[in-house]
Amino acid sequence: MADYKAPLRDMRFVLNEVFDVASLWAQLPELADTVDAETVEAILEEAGKVTSRTVAPLNRSADEEGCHWKDTVVTTPAGFPQAYQTYAEGGWVGVGGDPTYGGMGMPKAVSAQVEEMVNSSSLAFGLYPMLTAGACLSINAHASEELKQVYLPNMYAGIWAGSMCLTEAHAGTDLGIIRTKAEPQADGSYKVSGTKIFITGGEHDLTENIIHLVLAKLPDAPAGPKGISLFLVPKFMVNVDGSLGERNAVSCGSIEHKMGIQASATCVMNFDGAVGYIVGEANKGLAAMFTMMNYERLGVGIQGLASAERSYQSAVDYARDRLQSRSPTGPKAKDKVADPIIVHPDVRRMLLTMKAFNEGGRAFSTYVAMQLDTAKFSEEPVTRKRAEDLVALLTPVAKAFLTDLGLETTVLGQQVFGGHGYIREWGQEQLVRDVRITQIYEGTNGIQALDLLGRKVIGSGGAFYRLFADEIRHFITTAQPTLAEFTQPLSAALDNLDDLTAWLLDRAKNDPNEIGAASLEYLHVFGYTAYAYMWALMAKAALGKEAQEDFYVSKLGTARFYFARLLPRIHSLTASVKAGSESLFLLEADQF
């Protein structure tokens, strides 16, 4: 596999030239005082170095070795503890953390780029700091000041890790039926008992303590999701002076043997009357957990993008070097026995598809990150509410579309390699195996599609959708005529999405099956249209600069490819949606 190189030039282009993030931060007082261009540039440069030099070289060997479990103890692959220490010492675990407790305080638009880099380097490695950052979000937003003071500084510093304990063997998406219990104690603590499965980083040897956030039910809790509370349960108790005390009654029963992410410990966690502390209000645990869900689901989408970026880098290097046959228009490398395969139309189709999806995904994930920043830091109620509504609308798209395209893109990268792509030593098959989980965890992509169409679009009567559609329409109507080759197909795609949305709003009134039948295809029509908006924005930023740098020539060529060859996919997807739900119910269960 080719060495990983952080795509810093494209990240700078998206942040500075497409979105002008400095202007956004200047309007958000809390960020205006802490974020400046020089700091962000230094962060991106250093993150690129630590991920490419320290983490990326471990990716294949860590996959080959995997994690080891023995008598409740989990050992990560060789090199991981040292790499994690280096990563933590650089402050990267807390890059988006609250400065009050030792975090860097960077906006999500910046930390999103760091997440992409670490996950491109090793998706399995990147999961450990990601889960810690997610746990910190919930603690910071909902825990008492005492808990924040005790736990956040060491978690941001990477001295302690975090995990999120939601799933049980019988309760995945339907968290309302969890069985884990929390018994109140006289001293204000709780005894937490139950078993959780699929817990990323539930046990490992990277940090001296692990802080579990656990969903559980109080004895008098109402039934269903309204009876869930959130508890902080440390692996080791913390003494008054901050030192570690005795081991808590929480242990790892086993680790899963998985298709991919072998170096990430996916644990069965047993809580046997473990001491825990409530986070937030009783029976409001889901709300506390969902504080971090928008961030985590965007983060999973970025994992799909990151895997696709790593696959693309390897594929394009291979395509430039691999000699096979001659170009259809005649020899290009006349001094060689054959031409590099990058001359062949089908190889170019695959590479350009990868490139267009990756660069579109980077722009879209940054756009969603900016909405998260606005929702969190804006002091203007109207501005904040608009951003919150856009986050609600776009989060399921970011999670599902980026990861669906992540799998498609890594498979394309594998295909470029031909037979070598199926062989472990080249690294492409690992990326396919690793990225597959991103479509499943943090809410399967089918659930994300239902969330988008059922809750966010139809549930709001189309109001959330119109916010985004109106923004795109405003861009189209105010664009210069020189952008017509991009805005005209974008306008047609938006008209199509407007029509499809109105059709579904009407159909759902009379047929409840219509939402589930249409949701996945609808999400993809939405995603391709959103990417078209991103590509039109990028074309606007690049147009007229072609003489300055080949980067802009490449950007515009890729934009033209996206509009010509990828955006038209919306038409078959739209036809599928409008075929209705009837054909899904022609068979009885025993006829399948």
Image (spheres, rainbow, N blue to C red):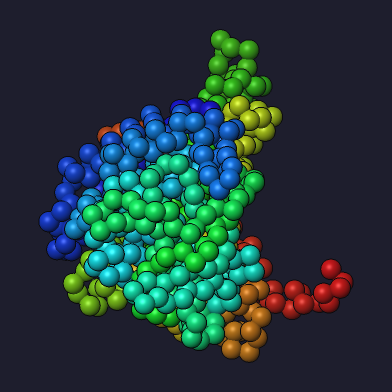
> In the image shown, does 348 or 154 lie closer to the viewer?
154
**Above-or-below relation of 191 to 134:** below
Image side of residue 334 versus residue 544, left or right: right
Q: Which residue is depicted at the point 22% across and 52% down?
A: 102
Image side of residue 366 versus residue 491, left or right: left
Q: Which residue is depicted at the point 63% across and 47% down?
A: 258
Quarter of the view holding residue 239: bottom left
Image side of residue 590 versus residue 314, left or right: right
Quarter of the view holding residue 135: bottom left
**Above-or-below relation of 403 to 465:** above
> In the image shown, does 35 or 366 lie closer to the viewer?
35
**Above-or-below relation of 55 to 128:** above
Quarter of the view holding residue 332: top right
Residue 259 visible (yes or no)? yes
Q: Residue 131: x, y in percent? A: 42, 54
Residue lying furthest top:
335
Q: Residue 34: x, y in percent? A: 15, 53
Q: Which residue is depicted at the point 65% across and 86% down?
A: 511
**Above-or-below relation of 427 to 199:** above
Q: Quadrant of the C terminus?
A: bottom right
Q: Residue 423: x, y in percent? A: 66, 30
Image side of residue 213 versus residue 349, left or right: left
Residue 105 visible (yes or no)? no
> In the image shown, does 188 or 46 lie closer to the viewer?
188
Q: Residue 276: x, y in percent? A: 41, 67
Q: Which residue is depicted at the point 14% across and 57% down?
A: 32
